[in-house]
Amino acid sequence: MRKQTVLRETASFDKRRETLSIDRDTVLLLIDVQEGFKDPKWGRRNNPCAEAKIAQVFNTWRVSGRPIIHVQHVSQEHASVFTPESPGIALQEEPDQLTKN
């Protein structure tokens, strides 16, 4: 049986401090953090603090040395902001830079 190492990380969420127990090999999976979601065609956002929250988690993960995987949406629909030739397909800046926009 493999012994698991559990680290304690402290991160700031909603202006309060929380300590989480996270396995050392736990992966952060960032899905669709792309420029295309900034397009006005999506309308008013229901998550205006999303980038700040992503940046907090991303920075905690990066400092801890845990793996991070980015998943990128690619569309074959010509009108999509996520076609391979569209600027919307680009991943947003490094999440630690998102809060500086």
Image (tube, rainbow, N blue to C red):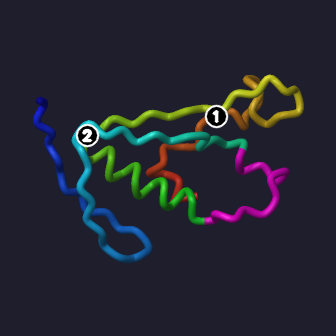
What segment is highlighted magenta in the picture? 37-48
Q: Is residue 89 magenta?
A: no
**Place of residue 89 in the rendered image (x, y in percent of width and height, measured from the top left):** 69, 33
Task: Identify the residue at image location x=31%, y=63%.
Answer: 11
Look at the picture and state if 32 lies above or below 58. Answer: above
- Residue 47 falls left or right of residue 3: right
Task: Identify the residue at image location x=23%, y=55%.
Answer: 21
Name the residue furthest front.
1
- Residue 81 falls left or right of residue 92: right
Pick whichever, 26 or 16, lies toward us.
26
- Residue 29 falls left or right of residue 33: left
- Residue 36 falls left or right of residue 65: right
Residue pointed to by mark 2: 65
Pick whichever, 2 or 85, lies toward us.
2
The quadrant in which residue 77 appears is top right
Residue pointed to by mark 1: 90
Task: Identify the residue at image location x=13%, y=31%.
Answer: 2
- Give the amino acid at mark 1: Ala
Mark 1 Cα-neighbour bin, 10 Å: few <14, some 14–19, many ≥20: some
Give the secondary structure at mark 2: loop
Question: Which of pointers 1 and 2 lies earlier in the amino acid sequence?
Answer: 2
